[in-house]
Amino acid sequence: MLELIIFAGLAVVVLFQLYSVLGRRVGRQPEDNAGDPALATVKPARLEGEEPQAAEAAEGVALSGLAAVRARDSSFDLSRFLGGAKSAYEMVVTAFAAGDRDTLRNLLAPGILASFDAEIARRETEGRTEVVEFSHPPRADLEKADVTGDTAQVTVRFLAEFRSRTKGPEGEGVDDRRTAELWTFERNLKSRDPNWILVRVDAAEA
C-alpha cells in the first residue's frame, strides 16, 4: 500500500510538470497580431506569371530604374531600345555632320536642336563641310533609367569609332575619332507616340 501511494504521488508530479510545459504559450500567437497593425498586415502573394515589378507596384513600393519604366510601359524592351538607340546615334551624328536639320528635328528635343543648329550655322558661315563614316556600329550600354511624373528618361553610354572628312578654306582633312558619350533619351509615357527623343548629350569616360 505504501508503494502505491508513492507511485501515485510521483504520477501527480509528472503530470503537473507535463501540463505546465504543454500549456505554456511559446513565441507569438496568432491572436497577438490583432493588437499590432504592422504585424497584422500581410503582403498579397504574387500571382503566377505576374511581373515582379508589377507585384511591387501593387504593394505600394516605390519603383526606380528599369522597373519604374516597365511598370508604366509594359511594352518596353531594353534590348530593342538599345538597338534603336544605336540607330538613332548614327543618324544624329551623320545628320549633324551633313547639316541635315530636317532629320535632326525629328530626333532632338527643342533645346538640344537649337545647340546643334547653332553649330551647323557656324560651319556654314565658315564655309566648312563634313562627312562622317562609321567603320562599325557603336557600342551602346544602359547607364541609368528613371521615371519622374509621366516622363521616362533612359541614359545610354555610347562608344564609337568613325572617320570624319572635312573641307574648308584651308583645304581637306581626315580625322579618325573615338568618342565616349552619354545620351539621355526621353518619352512622355502618356503619349501615344512610342518614339524617344534625345534631350541631353554629355561626355563620358571611355
Image: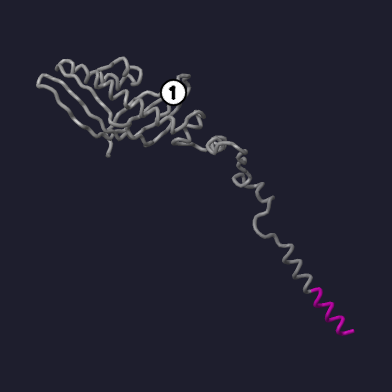
Image height of 27 relative to 121, above or below? below
Q: Which residue lies furthest to the right in this view?
A: 1
- How many other residues sit within 10 Å of disc 1, few (<14), some (14-19) or many (≥20)? some
Q: Is residue 4 magenta?
A: yes
Query: Could you tell whether 140 is left or right of 126 in the image?
Result: right
The residue that mark 1 highlights is 188
Identify the element where label 1 is drawn: strand
Residue situated in front as seen by the camera: 139 or 172: 172
Residue at figure coordinates x 25%, y 17% from the top left: 99
Q: Quadrant of the N terminus?
A: bottom right
Q: Where is residue 130 in the image (x, y as percent from the top left)?
A: 20, 21
Residue farthest front in this picture: 135
Residues shaded magenta: 1-12
Above/below status of 131 relative to 147 = above
Question: Residue 89, position in %: x, y?
Answer: 33, 27
Query: Residue visible at 15% across and 26% down?
Result: 173
